[in-house]
Image: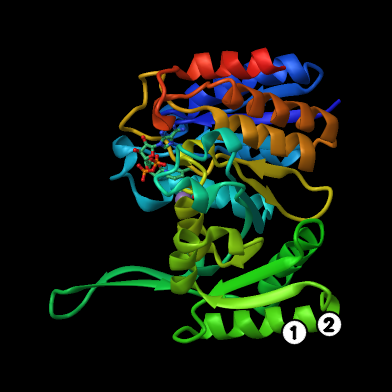
Amino acid sequence: MSTLLLLPGDGIGPEVIEQVRRVAGRIAGDIALGERDFGGCSYDAHGTPLTDEAEAAALAADAVLMGAVGGPKWATAPRDKRPEAALLRLRQAMGVYANLRPALCFDALKDASTLKPEVVAGLDIMIVRELTGGVYFGQPRGIETLADGQRRAVDTQVYTTSEIERVSRVAFELARGRRNKVTSCEKSNVMETGLLWREVVTDLHKRDYADVTLEHMLADNAAMQLVKNPRQFDVIVTDNLFGDILSDEASMLTGGIGLLPSASLGEAGKPGLYEPIHGSAPDIAGQGVANPLAAILSFEMALRWSLGRPEQADRLAAAVKAALDGGARTRDLGGTLTTAQMGDAVLAGL
Ligand code: NAD
Ligand code: IPM
Ligand code: MN
């Protein structure tokens, strides 16, 4: 029997994960669902945003599905006790170095983007974000007070050859099953890590993936090209920080951040970590109006990538499409449905 560990988290996290529970019960009732506190709620209950027991449960599951963590209540907690720090620790403990963030514009939603429909219609991009390295983890980091009383903050961007190569391999493999093109984004014009990134991707391409079209693009230009002509992209591979930013930008091409799921994968056979790319949305938390589709589609990715159930994943994807085709819209998409009503619409499609 497969096991899926739910980590609802904070803010709208529990609201959207509740809809995943309903959908999972309907489509894959034989999956054993576990649940643990994670993030701010865990800090409040246990004094730490990720208990050792919860981490062990995540490592022992077949897949982990997170809602969202963080919020103003914990913004002043010590850095290592913050919800976001726990998320980084979990990603690293699970070794999920490749974060797949598909930006897909559903036909029914081509008018929901702030961009013109003719720019986003038919959009299907896969952003592959490096997830366990870079400036998120580099040492040294910290804030020190200098002799003259000023304070000085340091973050370190660092990448090794193998870190770049393994995530690029994932991007090339994905491209082969899609439109066979990879765009690698960095800032090799100003950053040493960018230079190494470009060299490693170029080498790997020459060695193992010469059949795939490879293009290098500076990350600032990529941000511009994403809104100018997003359909030029197939697979984008980039570092942890640029991937974070470019994927939030890409979500608006699909109609909104409440739609974008993600899958974080590591070594074959290890559990994947699935999460919407959005956060805990403190501005709407508790109102029951958050869009649950990013979470539901993250479950769909878990069915596909960790739980070995592609048919159930296909059924769920079709149900989401049917709900949107039928006009189901939460507030962020210009509609009036509540979180639970959007859940109802997906269940109806099942
Ligand atoms: P956010 O993604 O929470 O919200 C940004 C905006 O998008 C808000 O206006 C919000 O209402 C809206 N939004 C987000 N998800 C939505 C949904 N499902 N349906 C409708 N609208 C939605 O980003 P933020 O406000 O910058 O961050 C809030 C907190 O969340 C911070 O503590 C941040 O660190 C944390 N965060 C966590 C994650 C995560 O857990 N993976 C991701 C991003 C941010
Ligand atoms: C995301 C989030 C996280 C990140 C934060 C909450 C640590 O923004 O998953 O996109 O920066 O990776
Ligand atoms: Mn983000």
Helix, strand or loop under label 1: helix
Q: Residues within 10 Å of mark 2 (few under 14, many from 20)?
A: few
Residue 235: percent from the left, percent from the top? 66, 61
Instruction: Please give the label number shown on residue 207.
Output: 2
Check mark 1 vs ligand 2: CB closer than 8 Å? yes or no.
Answer: no
Along the line of sight, the residue nearer the viewer: 159 or 349? 349
Residue at position x 45%, y 24% from top?
330
Q: Residue at x 78, y 23 (%)?
A: 31
Q: Quadrant of residue 27?
A: top right
Residue 213 vs 19, above or below: the answer is below
On screen, residue 135 above or below 264:
below
**Residues at discs 2 and 1 in contact (Cβ within 8 Å):** yes
Which quadrant of the rendered structure holds the C terminus?
A: top right
Residue 306 appears in the rendering: no
* Front in this rendered view, residue 315 or 108: 108
Is residue 186 left or right of 93 when viewed as pictured?
left
- Identified by mark 2, the residue type is Arg
Q: Tell me the SS state at disc 2.
A: helix
Residue 338 point in image, percent of width and height: 44, 17
Does residue 281 appear anywhere in the picture? yes
Residue kind at label 1, given as amino acid type = Asp
Residue 189, compared with residue 56, is above or below; it is below
Q: How is the image coloured?
A: rainbow
Q: Which residue is mark 1?
A: 203
Q: Residues within 10 Å of mark 1 (few under 14, many from 20)?
A: few
For image coordinates 46% across by 51% down, the residue present is: 248
Rendered view: 30 above or below 166: above
Could you tell me residue 307's position as x and y percent? 81, 35
Residue 202's quadrant in the figure? bottom right
Residue 255 is labelled as none
Given residues 234 and 80, the one toward you in this image is 234
